[in-house]
Image: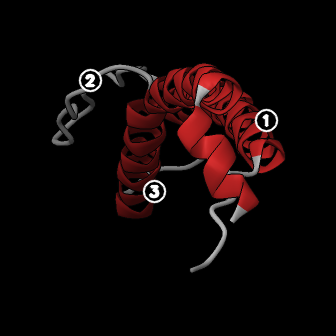
Amino acid sequence: MEKLVLDRDRFVELKNNTSQMNDKLEKAFQLGKEFLAMLQTTDQWEGKSKEEFQSYLHLVLQYHGQLIGEKMPAIGKVKTAKVNGNTCEAALETLQEHNRNMDQFTGNSKSYQELERI
């Protein structure tokens, strides 16, 4: 039988990485929104290629927005995707709950202590 090992350090590392990902997505989302606003108001680029790029950028921003719980307003023919909250924050809450449960389980459980000895 293999030894059951639950590596708390790896869960802490995962939590830190998820937090950094959330921060970077939020920053990229804000920069992308500013860039899209600039594209929409500039008269230096016109035509179909501008419209296609704006649509592409809008879709990318919707995707990032869904991950961080931010809604992108519709533009032109591109509609807005539903946003069900911040996925990264939900993952962080789940990891924090896991760590709390882990501490309780490993600290107080005779069964787990016996498994560690096997």
Residue 10 place in picture, x, y as percent: 77, 50
Secondary structure found at label 2 = loop
Residue situated in front as seen by the camera: 9 or 13: 9
Q: Which residue corresponds to mark 2?
A: 84
Amino acid type at image mark 3: Phe
Q: Which residue corresponds to mark 1?
A: 16
Amino acid type at image mark 1: Asn
Viewer-nearest of discs 3 and 2: 2
Tell me the residue at 47%/48% (across/down). Answer: 57
Q: What label does residue 53 carry, if any?
A: 3
Tell me the residue at 43%/31% (across/down). Answer: 87
For label 3, the crowd category at 10 Å Cα-Cα, with few meaning under 14, some 14 to 19 and many 20 or more, is few
Task: Indicate left or right for 2 with 53 as reference.
Answer: right
Where is the C terminus found, in terms of image quarters? bottom right
Tell me the residue at 54%/42% (across/down). Answer: 111
Q: CA distance from mark 3 to mark 2?
A: 26 Å
Residue 71 place in picture, x, y as percent: 35, 21
Secondary structure found at label 3 = helix
